[in-house]
């Protein structure tokens, strides 16, 4: 979506960096938000695709760039250089001179996937265990680096065909202990009068819990949000629907702890999710079908096992 005040550049436009002189060819618009327009681009002379974000405000963009720079150096230190070369968190930062004004932009890796809610709508709630686990791993990674994601919502989580999860839009990221910079009502702890807007690990875990409730029973969440006045809104209604709703029952112990801010940290939350939600989902103990890929992987491993046994017998 583009607006007339911020018209998008058409496909084929070449964006040349004012300082570094790199050239990027616009393929199409990937999306537009409050902070800028994101384009799918190809670096001139290269095959790889990237996402290029043009910001409206240099300062807003700069804080996103700072986070991406930290992620980039963290990844380097984790010895993931191979993948790093292919898909850097941050490729380039520059300005684009358009007529009389300079427009700041940065180039990041392109993430191919659909927003979490659309992925779950299409593939089914049996994918919640796996995608939730992957998302919690991403959040824990950020927390371990001293950051809080802040604006966690389904639109900011992209899921690939195979359930790989990536966070996008680092505009809401803040340092632990500082005020959360950007948030969206439903997912915000302050909106439910459930705690402050100071960024801590529990802030993201609260938003994660709301996101899961939304994926499992959006109607119930809507009603809970609507029932109370802003000044009287509290977590009682949330806790009650976590207990009442059949669809939420398998997740209730985890959700309750996250809503009440009872997890010591996101590592603990991740471990509990793994043991109580992800593992039972794998063996089909959670409601819903076991994902088809898991059944195929299981069938494949049985075939391999039989083959190995036969081979051992005949040799
Ligand atoms: N790295 C990426 N790879 C693929 N698509 C992306 C990427 N980054 C952003 N997008 C797309 O562009 C859209 C807008 O990007 P982004 O959320 O960063 O903008 P924003 O102005 O910060 O938005 P908001 O108003 O939600 O804060 C996203 O919803 C997504 O569809």
Image (cartoon, helix red, strand yellow):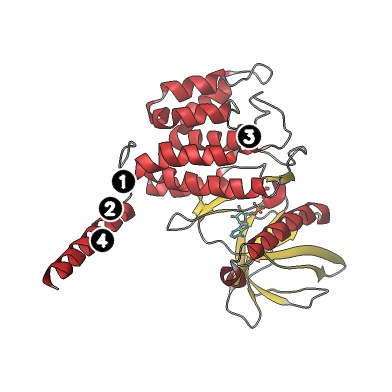
- Tell me the element at label 3: helix
- In the picture, the disc for residue 202 is 3
Q: Is residue 7 visible?
A: no
Cα distance in 3D space between marks 4 and 1: 15 Å
Q: Looking at the picture, does residue 109 appear above or below residue 257? A: below
Q: Are marks 2 and 4 in contact (CB under 8 Å)?
A: no
Q: Decide: few, some or many residues near mark 3? Use Cα within 10 Å; few <14, some 14-19, many ≥20.
A: many
N-terminal of the pair, mark 3 or mark 4, is 3
- Nearer to us of marks 4 and 1 is 4
Residue lying at the far right of the rendered structure? 100
According to the image, label 4 marks what residue? Answer: 300
The answer to whether mark 2 is within 8 Å of ligand 1 is: no
User: Residue at 65% of width from left, 16% of height from top?
Assistant: 232
Counting from the top left corner in percent of width and height, residue 140 is at 60, 46
Q: Are marks 1 and 2 in contact (CB under 8 Å)?
A: yes
Q: Is residue 82 visible?
A: yes
According to the image, label 1 marks what residue? Answer: 290
- Nearer to us of marks 1 and 3 is 3
């Amino acid at each position: 979506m583009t607006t007339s005040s911020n018209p998008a550049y058409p496909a084929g436009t070449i964006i040349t960096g004012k300082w570094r002189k790199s050239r990027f060819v616009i393929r199409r618009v990937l999306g537009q938000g409050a902070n800028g327009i994101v384009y799918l681009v190809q670096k001139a002379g290269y095959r790889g695709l990237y996402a290029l974000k043009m910001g409206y405000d240099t300062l807003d963009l700069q804080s996103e760039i700072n986070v991406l720079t930290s992620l980039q150096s963290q990844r380097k230190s984790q010895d993931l250089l191979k993948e790093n070369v292919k898909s850097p968190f941050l490729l380039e930062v520059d300005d684009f001179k358009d007529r009389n004004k300079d427009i700041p932009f940065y180039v990041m890796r392109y993430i191919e996937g659909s927003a979490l809610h659309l992925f779950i709508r299409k593939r089914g709630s049996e994918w919640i265990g796996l995608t939730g686990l992957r998302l919690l791993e991403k959040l824990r990674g950020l927390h371990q680096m001293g950051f809080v994601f802040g604006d966690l919502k389904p639109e900011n989580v992209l899921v690939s065909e195979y359930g790989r999860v990536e966070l996008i839009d680092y505009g809401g990221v803040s340092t632990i202990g500082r005020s959360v910079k950007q948030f969206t009502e439903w997912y915000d702890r302050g909106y439910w009068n459930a705690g402050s807007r100071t960024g801590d690990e529990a802030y993201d875990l609260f938003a994660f819990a709301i996101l899961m409730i939304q994926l499992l029973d959006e109607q119930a969440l809507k009603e809970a949000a609507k029932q109370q006045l802003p000044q009287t809104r509290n977590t009682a209604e949330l806790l009650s629907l976590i207990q009442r709703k059949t669809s939420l029952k398998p997740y209730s112990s985890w959700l309750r702890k996250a809503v009440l801010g009872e997890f010591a940290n996101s590592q603990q939350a991740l471990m509990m999710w793994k043991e109580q939600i992800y593992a039972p989902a794998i063996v089909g103990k959670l409601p819903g079908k076991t994902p088809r890929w898991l059944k195929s992987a299981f069938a494949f491993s049985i075939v391999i096992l039989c083959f190995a046994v036969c081979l051992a017998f005949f040799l």
